[in-house]
Image (cartoon, grey):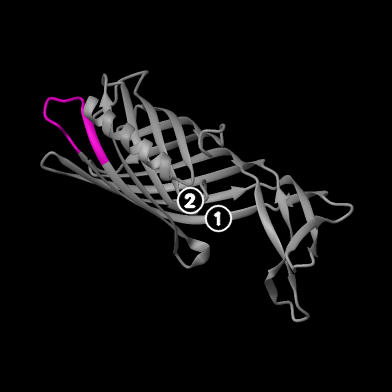
Amino acid sequence: MKKLLAILIIASVIGAAKAENFGLWTDVGLSQNLGVRGLSAEIGYDLRMNNHLKGVTRRSFNAGLNYSLTHYLKVGASYAYIYSFNVGEREDKYRTDDDGNIDYEQWKGYNFTHSYWRNKHRFIAYLKGDIDVGRFNISLRERYHHTIFQHGKAVEDKYRYNMIYDEDDNISYELKGGYPESEDDYKRSKVKDCLRQKMEVSYNIRHCPITPDVSVEMENNLHKAFHIDEMRYVAGAEWKITKKYHLGLHYHYHKGVGDDEDGNLHAIEFSLKIKNPFWKAKKY
């Protein structure tokens, strides 16, 4: 465990130094068999601090059911409420000619949209299969996401400048009178549908409570002809403290623009899983 922690810490430091965005995530989940063989319920809560740990950027709560069709195949459905933070964005503005073509050498100012929070509702359905190959476990999961982004409101500041030439034809800019202008920027509600395919490989170390794993996941945007919006690469381990309590430590690298993160992201995730705290599960 000490070696694994050292590797993940070193990887996180290297990732943070090179990352456009670095985050720290915490996740607590509880699962309980419902007394029907193969049927269980799950609830969870997570916090995410992205944007180089400048503050919480996401809070979410999820609840769902899953059912083991066989020892190797499981189906499930869940709902997640997500409260997400959107960082401020700047958009440069340029002059255009009579035909509407943008002249990128003729800068006239910019718009700055302040950060804001937004509600999301996500409905999930998935199918997961896994098989043991020696001491390895290989799993494949196909998950469908239907995410509803509720409308939101942000404040947008507009800055416009006059170009000024000195006697040597050097250019400087002077803020126009009456600027900056501020107005409300209303974010319309929208829907996103995607499929996520995930492959994970874990290794059961003999007489050891620690199980290392690696996974890769891709997100296909169904509104853009299965365009791959994001790739996710994860490596870490789960520590089985007791049958009920499992701790996880994982390093994430996300590349692309997905539902929850914009741009490339490196993150460390700490998780706690509590399994069957009320009564023992029935074996399938």
In the displayed structure image, the side of residue 55 where residue 196 appears, left or right: left
Q: Residue furthest right?
A: 178
| Bounds of the magenta segment | 203-213
How busy is the neighbourhood of tag 1: few (under 14 within 10 Å), some, or many (20 plus)? Answer: some
Residue at 56% of width from left, 33% of height from top?
54
Res 166 label: none
- The three-letter amino acid code for the residue at tag 2 is His
Report how many numbered discs are placed on residues in the image.
2
Q: Does 60 lie within the magenta span?
A: no
Residue 269 sits in which quadrant? top left
Residue 200, image x and y in percent?
Answer: 27, 45
Contact (CB < 8 A) between labels 2 and 1?
yes
How busy is the neighbourhood of tag 2: few (under 14 within 10 Å), some, or many (20 plus)? Answer: many
Residue 283 sits in which quadrant? top left
Residue 270, image x and y in percent?
Answer: 39, 29
Q: Secondary structure at mark 1?
A: strand
Q: Which residue lies under the disc numbered 2?
A: 145
Q: Which residue lies under the disc numbered 1?
A: 192
Q: Residue furthest bottom?
A: 99
- The three-letter amino acid code for the residue at tag 1 is Lys
Q: Is residue 37 visible?
A: yes
CA gap between label 2 and label 1 equals: 8 Å
In the displayed structure image, the side of residue 137 where residue 53 appears, left or right: right
Q: Does 212 lie within the magenta span?
A: yes
In the displayed structure image, the side of residue 243 where residue 125 appears, left or right: right
Give the camera-side residue of 170 and 132.
170
The mark nearer the N terminus, 2 or 1, is 2
Give the camera-side residue of 119 and 131.
119
Q: Which quarter shows the N terminus?
A: top left
